[in-house]
Image: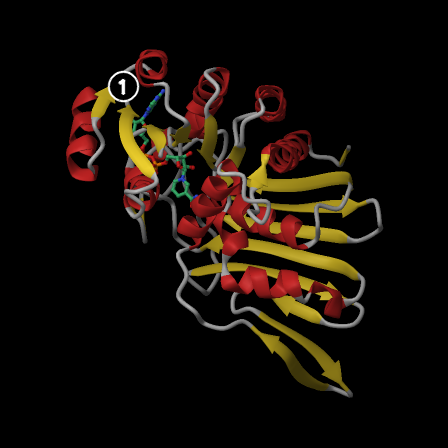
Amino acid sequence: MKKVAIVGAGQVAEKVHAAYYQTKPEEFLLAAVVDPDLARGELFCQNNQFQKAYTSITEMLTAEQPDIVSVCTPNRFHYDSVMSALEAGCSVFCEKPPAMTSVEAQNMWKRAEEKGVVLAYDFQHRYSPEAQMLKENIALLGEIYYSEANALRRSGVPGWGNFIDKALQGGGPLIDYGIHMLDTALYLLDFPKIKAVSAYQFQKIGTKKNQGTFGHWDPAKYTVEDSLFGTLEFEHGGILRINTSFALNIEPDKVLDVQLCGDQAGANLYPGKIYLDQAGELEIIKEATHAENNNHFTSIDNFCRKVAGDPQAMIADGRQGYIIQKVIETLYQSAEIGGKVEL
Ligand SMILES: NC(=O)c1ccc[n+]([C@@H]2O[C@H](COP(=O)([O-])OP(=O)(O)OC[C@H]3O[C@@H](n4cnc5c(N)ncnc54)[C@H](O)[C@@H]3O)[C@@H](O)[C@H]2O)c1
């Protein structure tokens, strides 16, 4: 039986992490939760069958000595929480994004390796039936030279949490939402070596409006980008475009997709299909089944199986977390300096 602790008693901790651990009472002892707000931590324990709430991670780690720690704090606190848990010899499942900077993500990756424990990130879209169908059949596409990772919302500035606060989040739609499609694209492309990165970002709506699909926000406190459009150039010559927004004047409410274009066939993630052109006619050669899947649960389940030593378990590991963080950081850097950044 593995002893589990959760750091950050918010909505993802409850709906995803605690919900998953509760499905396997024979495997997990729900020991503790850490939150600076003790009342919130105690309510979380009551509602999710965890035993004890703490306000200090150090105190919790010393008292409880858990095997597994789920990190669900705002982005700004991922690094300290993950490093403390790794230091205590715990395996860690950390929410996305890995951290605020690539140096932090690199330290986390290296420390997990030194301690011989598992570090994984919750990039759940790569576990979707659609992504798995594409991964299994990726060879059908031939040489993939153009791809897009699109995570766009017309009017989706989050009206809750810390999502508009750059100091706590590290950025806006790119680090919060675009990162999912970026991860899935890089996973499907097998993390090709990146040569250069360029991006443009805009803050045209969040500081002027105060209401959208996801509620109200204070425009005076809006410090992140509304939208960002970037390009990754790979050493093999291909490119990946990333387009992401909380708010952008487009027709659909949202676009969430990865598109891959190869010299033999093309593919989309949502809905998952592979197709090619037959003398001007589109032929769909593979389609994902529409099976219900809780991608979050599959993501945590792979982490837990990895901790248990299952060689088939597939995780977004420390190295991949570092690469993704580096890409995010470099996209922001390019947007700020207004030029291409060579890697
Ligand atoms: N994988 C996904 O699709 C997904 C979805 C939602 C959120 N997330 C990620 O999960 C994280 C949390 O998001 P949320 O929506 O649950 O936020 P939330 O605001 O609902 O919860 C955050 C909790 O962390 C607590 N907290 C703040 N500082 C802390 C600290 N130093 N130590 C311990 N606890 C602390 C807060 O009091 C709060 O209870 C973010 O990093 C977010 O990006 C990922």
Q: Quadrant of ligand 1?
A: top left
Q: Which quadrant is the N terminus positioned in? A: top left
Residue 130 x/y as whole percent: 54, 64
Residue 248 x/y as whole percent: 48, 52
SS for tag 1? Answer: loop
Farthest right residue? Answer: 236
* Residue in front for this viewpoint, 22 or 180: 22
Residue 251 can be seen in this image: yes
* Residue in front for this viewpoint, 288 or 248: 288
**126 on left or right of 166:** right
The residue located at (45%, 64%) in the rendering is 252
**175 on left or right of 280:** left
Say if 314 sits above or below 318 in the image. Answer: below
Q: Amino acid at mark 1?
A: Pro
Residue 160 can be seen in this image: no
**10 on left or right of 143:** left
Which quarter of the picture shows residue 223? Answer: top left
Residue 10 x/y as whole percent: 29, 34
The CB of the residue at mark 1 lies under 8 Å from ligand 1: yes
Label 1 crowd bin: few (<14), some (14–19), many (20+), radius 10 Å = some
Residue 149 x/y as whole percent: 60, 54
The residue singled out by tag 1 in the image is 36
Number of numbered discs: 1
Say if 289 sits above or below 196 in the image. Answer: below
The residue located at (52%, 40%) in the rendering is 306
**47 on left or right of 303:** left
Which quarter of the picture shows residue 64? Answer: top left
The colour style of the image is: secondary structure
Say if 116 sits above or below 149 in the image. Answer: above
